[in-house]
Amino acid sequence: MFNIGDFELNARLLLGTGKFDNETIQTKAIETSETEVLTFAVRRMNLYDKALPNPLAKVDLSKFITFPNTAGAKTAEEAVHIAKIANHAGVCDMIKVEVIGDDETLLPDPLETYEACDILLKQGYTVCPYVSNDVVLAKRLEDLGVHAIMPLASPIGTGRGINNPLNLRYIIERANVPIIVDAGIGSPKDACHAMELGADAVLLNTAISSAKDPVKMAEAMKLGINAGRLSYEAGRIPVKYTAQASSPQEGIGFL
């Protein structure tokens, strides 16, 4: 169990809701993942006009914590505006602050992200910024008062896994707020790795929704995340550079 602000969570898989081929697969994947949190881009949701298509129309949102994000924002001002739209529509006031600074890599803009977080915190939101593996920025955001930090594993949608485990470990070890690894996860191996490094949770979308069998992948990711957390809590053996016998040598008789 861990907390993001006032929200208490047991499941450590947070699930994005974009890119699924159809609503049936999406619903089954959500159920299989056993997630408690669904994130979505506010700009993709028709929060006011009920006559327009809604990608979550068949999902009983009362069973989940809804976690809107500001995807599409390129400035702090745009991110704050999107957060207000979600809030006015009665969506959960926990917001994933996502401000993109580069159109090719889709990497987040650190300065605009910081500014957006500052404004939203002062307005009473539960704020979770999406950032690169910037150790200093992560600490500055924590000092600012954010409720969780969401560093990417690698650029969004690439499935490359964790490109910078050292920086990610630095961020995790120094943080006093939850660290949720977000973006770039490609397989359960990557999700397990993130959890073994000490992350509190993993947010997934493309790795599940774009898999050949999203429902099976949702199951695999859930198991990988749980295994990684158990491994972290158990404490792995040290890495050594010489062979070590798996059985004690003392007391062995020789024929």
Image: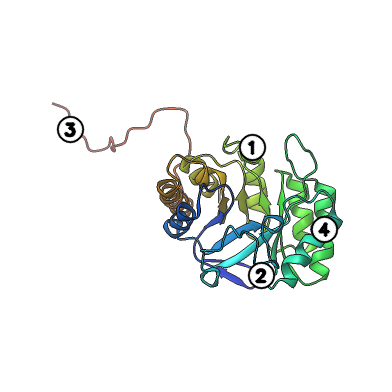
Q: Quadrant of residue 117?
A: bottom right
Q: Quadrant of residue 84?
A: bottom right
Residue 93 seen in the figure: yes
How many numbered circles are shown? 4
Q: Which residue is mark 4?
A: 116
18 to 95, vertically: above or below:
above
248 and 151: which one is in front?
A: 151
Camera-near label (2 vs 1) is 2
- Crowd tier of the residue under label 1, counting other residues whose Cα lies within 10 Å: few below 14, some 14–19, many 20 or above: few
Residue 65, horizontal then vertical, whole percent: 58, 68
223 and 230: which one is in front?
A: 223
- Crowd tier of the residue under label 2, counting other residues whose Cα lies within 10 Å: few below 14, some 14–19, many 20 or above: some
91 and 137: which one is in front?
A: 91
Q: CA distance from mark 2 to mark 1?
A: 32 Å
Earlier in the chain: of badge 1 and badge 3, it is: 1
Disc number placed over residue 164 in the picture, else none? 1
| Residue at 76 percent of width and 45 percent of height | 108
Q: CA distance from mark 2 to mark 4?
A: 18 Å
Q: Amino acid at mark 1?
A: Asn
Check the image and name the residue furthest to the front.
Answer: 51
Q: Amino acid at mark 2?
A: Cys
Q: Which residue is mark 3?
A: 253
| Residue at 77 percent of width and 50 percent of height | 99
Disc number placed over residue 92 in the picture, else none? 2
32 to 194, vertically: above or below:
below
Camera-near label (3 vs 4) is 4
Earlier in the chain: of badge 4 and badge 1, it is: 4
Residue 215, horizontal then vertical, whole percent: 42, 49
Camera-near label (2 vs 4) is 2
* Element class at badge 4: helix
- Asked if the residue under mark 1 is in contact with the one under mark 4, i.e. CB atoms within 8 Å, the reply is no
Disc number placed over residue 225 in the picture, else none? none
